[in-house]
Structure formats: structure tokens, C-alpha cells
Amino acid sequence: MAALAQAFAPYRRYLNSTMLTIGIAVVVALFVSVRYGPFALINSLVLGGMWALIAAGLALMFGVMNIPNFAQGEFFMVGSFTAYFVYSAINNALGKNPPSALAALAPFVGIAAAIGVGAIVGVLVEKLLFAPLRKRTRENWVLNAFLLTAGLAVVMTNGAQIIFGTSFRGITRYWDVDPIQILGVNVSVDRLVSLAIALVTIALFWLFLSRTQTGRAMRAVAQDEVGAQMQGIDLGRIYLLTVALTCALAALAGGTLLFMFPAYPTTGIKALYVSWYVLILAGLGNVGGAIIGGFMVALLQTLTTYFVGEAWQDVVPIVIIVLILLFKPSGLFGSGVKGIWEQ
Amino acid sequence: METTEKNVTVSARVPSLFTWIWNFMGFSWVGVAVFAIFAVLPLIPPFNREDLVRWQIGAALLGAQAIAFDFTAGYIGIVNFGFAAFVGLGGYVSALLAVRFGVSPWIGMFVGAFASGLLGFLTGALTLRLRGIFAAVMTWFVGLALLGLTRNLTDLTRGALGLNVPALLETSSNLPYYYIIFVMMLITLLVLRAIVRSHIGLAFRAIGQNVEAARASGVNPTYYRVLNFTISCAFAGWLGSFYAHFYGILTPDVMATGKTVEVLADAYIGGRMSLWGGAVAAYPFVFFLEWLRTSLSQFAGLNLVIYGLSLILVMIYYPGGLAEAYHALERRLRKDKQ
Amino acid sequence: MLELDSINASYDFLQVLWDVSLTVREDEFVALIGPNGAGKTTTLRTIAGLLKPSAGHIKYRGQQIQGLLPHEIHRLGISFVSETMNLFPSMSVYENLLLGAYTVPDKKAKLRSLDFVFELFPRLHERRNQMAGTLSGGERKMLALGRGLMSSPSLLLVDEPSLGLAPMLTASVFEALQTLHAKGMTILLVEQNVNSTLRITNRGYVLEHGRIVMQGPSAELKSNSYVQKAYLGV
């Protein structure tokens, strides 16, 4: 008996709240797929991947620049609109019976455009809003930046309303092909490609942050700004890059999910509060935690939908997060998963 | 010689009640004048037009909310990002009491205040272990949860279909309503100002600046934070009832985050930690925005864009807001006098 | 190489440096000593660009550098090892060092610097995968110094490397600085440990209350009666 305990001793340190939470999540995921069929699980994964991206951007911006971005949903909206207009334009140009290769590529062009426009808008926001605020005053920075992004969100939502009107601009699907059979369930190609995009992007993003000098520089700025400057890192450039990346990630999600969430001025609201749920759940500034958290919140939402009803999927996660915060104010992974850096 | 001395001593030792209140509250003649103008404004043409009176009601209501909001944001340094939900809760409670039990709105508004105050008490307690931005996001989540509940409990609230609310008064004129909300705004301002200028306000400011130092000085941050939230949210609920019984219809959208941002913008443009700033700024602001909305109606939403831009510009270029500008002007004039 | 000319610096409205002038020539090892709060750290921070002087000039190899941003100054070849070290706690020793070579584009040069630092501080090599936040005080100082060397700087500014270190570690830190100087590095050293400092440096400046009150060859300063009484406890 004692020998057995000793054999497991080196694994003891993994039995902390983080692993427990992830373990529970995995069990729940399995339960969901067994009880409600794989479609529920796949849907959770698709949404989870996107929530992970949006939340990762949010965590990045908070960690590196100490800005709680209340306009993150607006960048989702920007991506949504961009993808819609670019994709529709290409579709119209291609005509009734487009060659299948081009038709298959068109959505990617739309999504790529969404990323590009998102990054550009991010750069503008940094240059026009955050840089001047930084110059003005450093005190009360977090709160002031937060309020600034709140004002930005109002401007962007209503600006979009003025320019585009309130009508929903949606597409039924990106790829006009039959759904694929997975585990006896029909899964649309759109969903599969979204999941693939999410996973690839997460992997690239993670590699960028952990393996490249620039990614390392960003993490350095998050941990010690003065130290980073002392190594010759240009803070201004890192800020620009961070904001561009954050907004690009949200826009990517918006563009990719166009088949699920049509483009209209307030489409970003859901993305906004879901990404904030994830952030609070995972611990502010914790990018790794945000990625895992994205999937967990999606799972939670799916569970709520099946157990209680779709309308409650926004209320229940909040109650759970409030409870978690009561017992662990630093967030679920605050002191557990070290992500890339911690708060 | 003796007579003069005696007179001086007597008047110094026994100031009249009026002077005492004047000094304690820190009133100024300018302030009194401004609010006097607001009081008589709807009687003066062209401001006595029914639609303009409606604007003034909107201004007073927004201003009153900004006062209650600033009570928390300016003094204990926590932005109650779910504020609109507390306003809405008061409105719904009062409305439902009237609709289902025939309770008079004049009583309902205090029940609404109580309900919001209670929720404020709980929310304040919830945010105790959290600092700055965490606390703000937590209050935001409370607001979102409330919004979700209101939307989903359609048997109770009729959700997005809207709840028809009996009016406060049996009159088709807006003018009486203006005076009701104006008095409510004054009461809010006077009560909160009195609290803020008392030792309680000192405690608020202490925990707003530095919680540890406050605790070390014997100030109990828990007690004061929860107290502040409760009071602020109670007033929010009280004002929410007016909203419900004046506009006559309630939808869950009154609790939307965007509504909180409106109040927040007004409070910050008016000047944080001033209380009166939001009230005074509300009038020109609401007038300007309503004018935009009605005259440039093809650009639906332009007024809100301007609103957001104003918040951004104030945050970057003049974070002190209207109150700071006023004090700067005051100092300038005093210097010039010397 | 480095010339400070009548530098005045303040933190908000409190003036800390008053007409500070000093020079550091190529290949010199110069000391800046003085009591706590004299403004020594402020001087280094001003040179490094973390603080903008309110008056005066700083010339580096003939170029005016006051007012430049810290990362620009680093790129000119001036490396600052601060007293608070400013390490990146959630990154490994290895990653911290790599970041020290952020401005070095050539991969081979980076590896060479890495080898150099690991040779100088074998302890760092042992702990190269350990998180910087979990290192001991002495190891942190070594890492900070090592990181400062990764960019092969022409001028090294070191602020109180021995502060809080056990005597044995202090000795090894000073040894390392001596070795670096012997290899041709120009160093400006701020220290409270006056004895060892004056022993290994060429020249020294004494800063008190934000003003240079004395300067000269280190040997002379060491035998100066005032210095002996005030700083050497004689």
C-alpha cells in the first residue's frame, strides 16, 4: 500500500485546482457527448475555439498593456462585416456557377480580409486613443483605459448603425457542400473548418508567444516594462503589435463565425461578455488560461442550453463565475496554470 | 468698545441654522442660481413646449442617476458597471406591484428603492475581496445576470414584449412630472452630498484612495463599501420607479449596459467626485443629443456616437470634467481679484 | 566616451541632481559612490534614458543622448543593470538571457554571448531552465548582470550589484566585474561597498545630496581622510 502511494508521489503536484477543473471539464465533455450526441460536443468545440481566440486577445491586451478592453466585441463585429462584404462581393463576381476551387477559396479571402481590417482598426485605436491617453497621465491608468474602451464601444456600435443600418446581413453557409458524417452525426463543413481555423490559430499564436523573440518581447513587456526597455525593446512597437493582434483575433472569430452569427451592429455583445467571462474565470492577463477557459465556457453554455434552456445560457455561467470568484478571487487559473505569464 | 465686542462674540458663537447648513453643505451662490434656473426653466418659452419639457425630464432623470452613480465611482473608486440594472430593478418592482397588486406608485417607488438597495447590499458584499477592475466587472456581471433574468422570466415580466406601467399622475401634461423628477434629483443631491460631507464621506474617500491605509487608520472598508453600494443602489431603484411610471412601458433593455454607459459618461463629463457635475452637465448634454436625434433622424445613432466621443475626449484631454473646469475658473477669478 | 555636463534631474517637483558632471573614458572602470539617497541611482537612470534631465547634456561618443528613449540608448551600446534588476519572473534564466540579446540579430553572436555568460556564471548554466522568479538573491544578481552583458555592450552601467548579498557572493560579483574590465569593457559602477569598489576601479566620483563633492583616481580617494572617515569607517 505504502509502495503504491510512493509510486504516485511525484504526480502529487498535479493534483491542484487547475488539473481538477480541467479533469472535471473533460468528464463533463464526455458526458455531454454520450448523453446528447456528438453534435453538442462539436458545437461546443467550435464555439469554444472561437471564444478561446477572442479571450486570448483580451488577456493579451490586459497582460501586456494593462488595458481592460471593453470594445473587444466591436472588433468581432468589424470582422463580421468585413467578411460579409468581401465574401459577398466575391460571390457576386463569381456568378451563378463558379468553379468549385474558387468558390471554396472565397470564404478564406473574406476571413483573411477580416483579419487585416481588424488589425488596421487596432492600430488606429492604439495611435488615436491609447497613445494620447498614455501621454496624458499614467495614474488611474486601468480605470481610465477601461472607460475609454467603453466610449469606443459606444462609438463603434452606433457608428456601424449609422453606416450600415440595423438589418442583419447573414449568409446561410460558406461552403455549399454536403455535411460530413462524424460518429454518426452530420456536421456541416462550415463548422469543421471553423474548428480547424481555431485550432491552427491557437497553435500558431502559442508558438509565436513562446518561441519567437518578438513573442518573448511581448511577454517581457507584460512582466516588467522597464526591464524590457532596458533590453532595447521598443515599447511603442510592442503596444501597436499587441493591439493589432488582439483586434485581429476578435475579427478572425467574427469573420469565421459569419455562418452562425450574421453581421449587424450589435453582434459583438455576445462576444464581449463571453470573452470577459472567460477572462475573469481564467484570471486576468493569463493567456494560456484564457484559451482553456474559452472551451470550458462553451461547454458550460452547451450544458446550460440542454439542461435549462437556451435563454439561460448567459445567466448560469455568470452565477457560476460569481461563486468561483467568491472563493478564488484571482480566477480559476490565477495561481494554477502558469499559462505564458501570470497576473 | 464693549458693545461692539459683545456683538461680535454673540454672532460668532450662535450662527443661525441657515448659515450652519450653508457651510456644512458647502453651497455656493452660483450653485443655487444654476439649480434655480433649472427649476423655472420649463416655465420659460420656448422651453415650455411639451416635447422640450420631456427633454428636461430626461435631463433631470439622467442627472439624478449620475449623482447616485458618482457617489460610488467618485468616492469609493468602484465603477458600478451594472448600474442600469439596479435602476431597472426598482422600475420593475414598482411596476409589478402596481400592475398585479394595485399598489400606488408613490409607495411602489420606495419598495423599488428597497429592492435595489438590498441587491446593492449583496453586490457590495460580493465585490469586497476584489480590487478595482475586478470589482467593476463583477458589478457588470450582476447587471447582466439581472438583465438575463428579467428577459427570461417572461411570466413575471413579459420579457421583451414590454410591461405596461400605470402612470404616476392622471395628467397628459409633462410639467408636473418634471417637478417630481426635479425634486427627486434635488433630494438625491442633497442627501448624498450631506453624507459625503460628513465623516462617512471621509471614510469613503479613505477607502477609495488606499484601502490598507484606511484599515490601518481604523476605518472598516467592508462596512463603508457595503454602505455606499446600498445607498447608491437604493437611489437608483427609486429613480427607476419614476422612469417606469413616467414612460409607461418597461422592457429589459432599460437594464442594458449601454444605459449604464450613458449615466457613466454623464457622470464623468460632469466631473468625478463632484456629485453635482453630472446633474448640471445633463441639461446641455441631453438637449444637444435630443436635438441631434430629432433633427438628424436619418443618422440614427449619431447622438450616441457623439456621446461616446465625448467620453473618450474627456478621458484623454480633460479627465476632471465640468467640475474641474468650474473650480479652475473659480481659482482664476479669485487670483485676478487679488 | 561618456560625458555628463551639468545634469539636473527631478522626480516630479523634487530636484535630486544638481549640476552633476562626470566623464568615463574608453576602457575605464569608474566608481560612483556616496550615501543612501544621494542620487546615484538617479544618475544612472538618467544616463539610461529612464529619466529625462531638466537641464544639462549627456554625450556618448560625441552624440547627445539626453532625452532619447531607453531602448534607443540601449541600442547605442549602453547596457544598464538596475539595482532592482527588473528581471522577467515568469520566464526561465535562459529566456531572460535571450532577451538580453534582443537587439542582436545574428544567431551565432547570441550563442557566443550565452556561452560567455555561462562561463562567467556557471551557476546560471546549472539553473538555465528555472523560472527567474524562483532564484535566490545572489542568482538573481548574477542573472541581471549576465543579461546586461548579452548585447555585448560598449558601456556597462551597474547599480549596487552587491546590495543584499552575502560576502562570498559579493566577492564573486566584484571578481566578475574585474574580469569584464580586464577584457576591455568600460564600466560605470554605483556601489555602497566603498572599500572593494575603490580597490578595483580606476577613478571615482563622490556624490552627496545630488552634487559631486569629490573626484579623482581611486587610490587617492581611498587614502583621502574625509572618504576614510565617512565611508570606510576609519
Image (cartoon, rainbow, N blue to C red):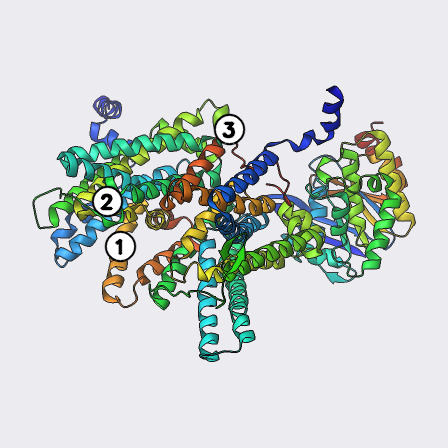
Residue sitting nearer the eye, A73 or B7: A73
**Looking at the figure, which quarter contains the C terminus of chain A?**
top right
Can residue C218 be seen here? no
Residue B5 position by quadrant:
top left
Disc 1: which residue: B286
Q: Where is residue A5 in the image (x, y as percent from the top left)?
A: 72, 23
Residue C163 position by quadrant:
top right
Which amino acid does the dot numbered 2 rest on? Arg
Q: Position of residue C72 (x, y in %)?
A: 70, 58
Q: Which residue is drawn at 41% across and 63% down?
A: A263
Can residue A32 be seen here? yes
Q: How crowded is mark 1: few (under 14 residues within 10 Å), some or many (20 or more)?
A: many
Q: Mark 3 lies on which chain?
A: B
Q: How far apart are marks 1 and 2 (CA)?
A: 30 Å
Which amino acid does the dot numbered 3 rest on? Ala
Disc 3: which residue: B213
Q: Mark 1 lies on which chain?
A: B
Whether callout 2 and callout 3 share a subunit is answered: yes
Q: Is residue A207 left or right of residue C216?
A: left
Please, what secondary structure does the residue beneath circle 3 have?
helix
Q: Which residue is drawn at 84% across and 33% down?
A: C169
Residue sitting nearer the eye, A55 or C109: A55
Q: Position of residue B50 (x, y in %)?
A: 13, 56
Residue reaching furthest to the front: A184
- Per the rendering, the mark at residue B121 is none
Q: Is residue A101 above or below residue A268?
A: below
Q: Residues within 10 Å of mark 2 (few under 14, many from 20)?
A: some
Nearer mark to the viewer, of 2 and 3? 2
